Amino acid sequence: NFRFDEVRSVCHVLSCGDRKSVPEKPLNVTLNFRSHSGVLDVAVAVLHLLYQAFPGAANKLPDDVGLFKGPRPSVLCRRDDKFLDDTTLREVLKKNPSLVVLTPDDHLDCLKENLSSVSETIILGACEAKGLDFDQVAIVNFFSSSTKQQERAWKELFKSASGKQSAWEMSRYPELEMRMKLLYTAITRCRHRLFFAETANSASGDAF
């Protein structure tokens, strides 16, 4: 993970304290010109959860705000159900070819195989999509693709955040830190319309 403060510290040591050789402190710009607040509010909520669960995992900065509110993110699901089956998801993607699908990178091959008939759809791993942005993004199977350990960690984290459980113990689930950062990365790839979809039921997905 890149942190500008650490670069300044290295320059300070290498220059033996010569301030002229140390880059100036960066100016933090909180007005986001790419994504609107509808998307950014969800990203900020994930960041705050990360700060709470793993203090020191990321620099605490002022919350990003968009130029306008924009549409709120949505959950794609069948009526009277909490998730989509693969067939319904394929139908949705065929009718919306501009929708870019993001999923955890360790689930990418499986999802591509399940959606092989939807040839026009771009399907990327969340880490693979770093540095890119798209008008419409569907984050698919982020929770239902979790391991049992990750599933338990998400569930306990969400319960702790909502006050339904005692304090969160980050030492029990250190792997969740990177998973949360991956979720933040996936959310912030979106410029306009953001969707979440799960093709299988999961306790962590329901809690999210």
Image (spheres, rainbow, N blue to C red):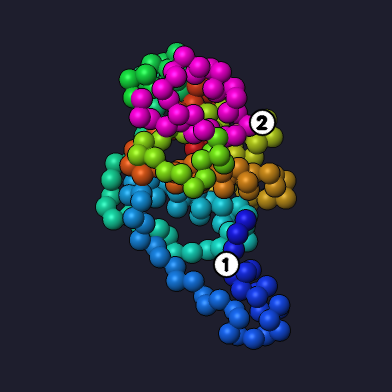
How crowded is the residue under tag 1: few (<14 C-alpha within 10 Å), some, or many (20+)?
A: few
Report the front residue among 12 and 166: 12
Task: Tell me if residue 89 comes above or below residue 36 in the rendering.
Answer: above
Report the front residue among 155 and 127: 127
> Which numbered mark, 1 or 2, is in the foreground of this view?
1
Q: Which residues are magenta?
A: 97-124
Q: Quadrant of the N terminus?
A: bottom right
**Residue 96 in picture, x, y percent from top left:** 34, 24
* Residue type pointed to by label 2: Thr
Find out whether residue 109 is within the magenta segment.
yes
Q: Is residue 158 visible?
A: no
Report the front residue among 101 and 205: 101
How crowded is the residue under tag 2: few (<14 C-alpha within 10 Å), some, or many (20+)?
A: few
Where residue 4 is drawn, which disc sits there? 1
Query: What residue sits right under mark 2 in the picture?
Result: 147
Where residue 172 is drawn, which disc sits there? none
Task: Tell me if residue 184 comes above or below residue 196 in the rendering.
Answer: below
Tell me the element at label 1: helix
Upstream in sequence: badge 1 or badge 2: 1
* Residue at 60% in and 42% down: 179
Residue 142: quadrant of the picture? top right
**Residue 99 in picture, x, y percent from top left:** 38, 30
